[in-house]
Image (cartoon, rainbow, N blue to C red):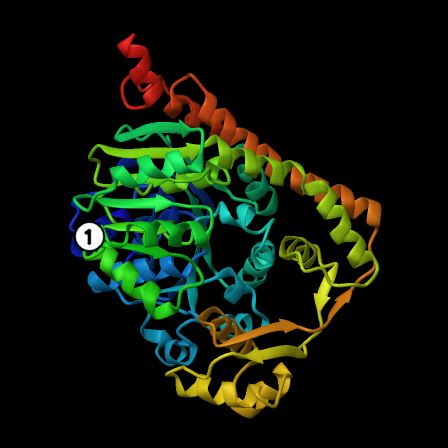
Amino acid sequence: MKLNIFNAQKLLKQYFNYDDFRENQKSVIKNVLNTQEDSLIIMPTGGGKSILYTIPALLYNGLTIIVSPLIALMQDQVLNLKTRRINAEYISSEDNNFNEIKSKIKEIKLLFISPERFTNKTFFLWLKTLDIDFIALDEAHTFTEYGLSFRASYRLFFDKLNELKKNKNIKFMALTATASEFIYNDLTSNYKFKRIFKFNSFRNNLNIKINLFETEKEKDLVLYSVLNEKNTSLIYTMTRRSAEKIYYRSGEKFKKLRYYHAKLPSNIKKDILKGFIDNKIKIIASTTAFGMGIDKSDVRFVYHSELPNSIEDYAQQIGRAGRDGKLSDVIMYLSKENIEIRKNIIYNNKENLEIELKKLKNGKITENESIKNIFLIRNLITPIEYPILEINILSDLTSYPFLINLLKLLKNENNIKIISKKLDVEPWIIEDSLNYLQNRGNIEYKIKKYTINTFNYEEELKYLYKDDDIKIKKFEDMIDFINTKECRHKWLANYFNNEIEDCKTICDNCRRKNEI
């Protein structure tokens, strides 16, 4: 099938039952099909970003790779595509499904993988052998948001992409709904995009409202009183404990309420996602692990029970509401008590950074994961190849034969290289399986030894302070948004370098002005 907009429209009708693309989508699709320009697309949530890589993928003869940040997001997207009879798969350490995917790779049109998978040495060698036509970096803001904090692989992504493109004619696209000036500058300084598409972020069907209480107790009483199972709702929390608290305090009242976070077993996460899509679950209390890119059109309420980490996170999360275009409520329930606690933690972090850096200077591995990840990103800490592990086996319960054999081996062996040879699989499969077993609660493990390279203490302290200053700025931006008296939609648009008029009636501030 020829790469042209006519054939793209035929596929759009065949698989999505739309007669034509939206104007925004059409301009991007034409660029993908008619030029060799790699592009950055900044399009609001609900704008139909997934179609921008799905339709070209169906036109290309080879494979399309989608690099995506979250398992829940991959599962949802693949499930959605399969219901449309599009051959899509994802690779996950939770499912240990690599060998199955490998055996049928020629049949697959879209393959979803994590950045950690994309940059893994052994996996990348396999990628080089494939007939790849198109690569998309979905939720591209996470290159900055996650890459600069806790996912070092993101910062290797563009180097690996360029390496893969050297001898292959591969088109590339990065997509996000939230690109602040900082994120935009970070993305464009790390990759030379030939074309940038930026569309208005205003959503005129989102009723934004912020309720501020003195104490957590007051806030909780009101939040729990407004919940109901008539409409689909998401409640965002900052911690796993907070998500679980909402469930255990309201679980008896609401039979269709569940909690969700990254540490839940894979099978439970899948069941929750399916139940949510099928309307068997109506309310989900979740950390940021659930929601990004989840394609459910009738979410009528998005609540925040705690202050989000950043405006970018907030914009992504409220974007889950009203994707069908119908009026929907996005409401924060916050307490001054909780905000003050967060403020003290954020503003007093510099002293802790200095203590942790001194440990590294003295050759000791810090227990602070944020510090460790920053140093991994900067290549100042290097795990020794095939490291020796310190393992504590908590439970043998698992239904996978491969994992049963792995657990047996772990009782007497702690060297990844030896384990991989005995099980006849690549070392990275062992690493992924260890992460899966730890997330399930079968084992606890940690790498026993790192190589700490020499570094300039004063220079690195400045870098860590700069990283800390970014977190402070994000907190202050959130406080400004809460306290602003201007139109909240206009405030958000300005933050993302867009200009709009006041919304007049669809945020609490504008409604208040019009009532006076």
Q: Quadrant of the N terminus?
A: bottom left
Q: Residue at x 48, y 30 (%)?
A: 336
Q: Residue furthest top?
A: 516
- In percent of width and height, residue 368 lies at 66, 56
Q: Residue at x 58, y 54 (%)?
A: 150
Query: Label 1 neighbourhood size at 10 Å, few (<14), some (14-19), many (20+)?
Result: few
Q: Is residue 205 above or below residue 17?
A: above
Task: Tell me the kind of residue under disc 1.
Answer: Phe
Reply above or below: 390 against 353: below
**How many marks can you see?**
1
Q: Nearer the viewer, residue 406 or 152?
A: 406
Which residue is drawn at the image coordinates 21% and 65% (left, top)? Answer: 85
The residue lying furthest to the front in this view is: 217
Q: Is residue 293 visible?
A: no
Quarter of the image for residue 509 reads top left
Q: Check disc 1 and report the residue beneath it.
A: 16
User: 103 or 507: nearer the eye?
Assistant: 507
Q: Secondary structure at mark 1?
A: helix
> Which residue occupies 22% across, 49% down?
9
The quarter of the image holding the C terminus is top left
